[in-house]
Amino acid sequence: MTELAYSAAAERNKQAILTVLRTFLPPRGVALEIACGTGQHVAWFGANLPQWTWEPTDLKADLFPDIMVRIGEARLGNVLPPRLLNVLGEAWRIEREDPDLIYCANMLHIAPWSCCAGLMRGAARHLAAGGRLVTYGPCLEDDVSTSEGNLKFDAALRDENPDWGIRRREAVEQVAHAAGLQLVARHAMPANNLLLVWERAD
Ligand SMILES: C[S@@+](CC[C@H](N)C(=O)[O-])C[C@H]1O[C@@H](n2cnc3c(N)ncnc32)[C@H](O)[C@@H]1O
């Protein structure tokens, strides 16, 4: 096996995320992944939801060779080659139009706040009728006390880059509403993460 770019967190959380996705995804469809990172999530979901077609994308292409190897080694015919996609781009250039699922894990806190609006507007523009956006990652919430771990993580993120930081769910919801999306489900996940499901408000 080749030594590939690896995220211990992605390895830990991929099954818990898949378990939740299985509760509401239809048996088949097209999924667009935003901010795919190492590609561990898309490889896991591709292998375990074989009737779905997956298109991984990211702002940066440096891990794309590793993702190609990961997809090849797992013989995943349902995962497309990764593509460059910046959520801030006016037009998202994607291979498979009208995705039924747009999936974005762990980007909102490690990107400028403007990326939240970019993600929401792009999802509202591109989702198929009845499609869903799923966001996953740490989140602060007005009516839920913040764990010590998330407070420390938030401080460390802001130290590293003042534009980063754990976002407040209510603020993300406001941005989503402005883009025409509404929150339809909230799943508390291990290690103080949230999996949020969004749909077009109309
Ligand atoms: C912490 S990694 C998350 C990777 C993977 N989703 C996971 O959960 O392991 C954050 C990713 O967000 C991507 N990213 C940051 N800004 C972005 C933008 N404007 N558009 C698309 N992706 C972006 C980075 O390139 C990086 O791969």
Image (tube, grey):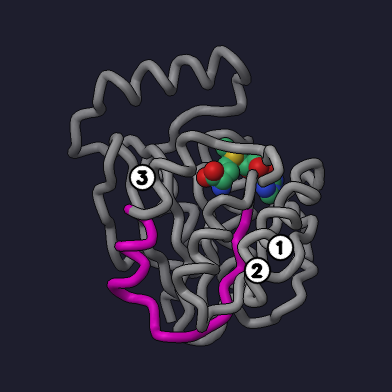
Q: How crowded is mark 1: few (under 14 residues within 10 Å), some or many (20 or more)?
A: some
Front residue of 11/132: it is 11
Do the residues under discs 1 and 3 have CB atoms within 8 angstroms? no
Identify the residue under disc 1.
72
Q: Residue at x 62, y 57 (%)?
A: 34
Viewer-nearest of labels 3 and 2? 2
Q: Residues within 10 Å of mark 2 (few under 14, many from 20)?
A: few
Residue 5 in view here: yes
Q: Give the range drawn in magenta.
A: 16-34
Identify the residue under disc 3.
169
Q: Report the Cα–Cα distance between label 1 and label 3.
A: 37 Å
Which quadrant holds residue 124?
bottom right
Work out whether mark 3 precedes mark 2 in sequence or the reverse, and give the earlier one. 2
Q: Which amino acid type corresponds to the residue marked 1 in the rendered image?
A: Gly
Front residue of 47/184: it is 47
Identify the residue under disc 2.
75
Q: Residue at x 58, y 67 (%)?
A: 123
Which mark, by number, is residue 156? Answer: none
Indicate the secondary structure of the residue bearing disc 1: helix
Do the residues under discs 1 and 2 have CB atoms within 8 angstroms? yes
Determine whether, in the image, residue 21 is placed left or right of residue 132: left
Determine whether, in the image, residue 46 is placed left or right of residue 94: left
Q: Within the magenta stretch, is there residue 21?
A: yes
> x%, y% of residue 50?
51, 78
Determine whether, in the image, residue 2 is placed left or right of residue 149: right
Q: Which residue is drawn at 24% across and 48% down?
A: 188
> x%, y% of residue 68?
75, 57
Q: Within the magenta stretch, is there residue 39?
A: no
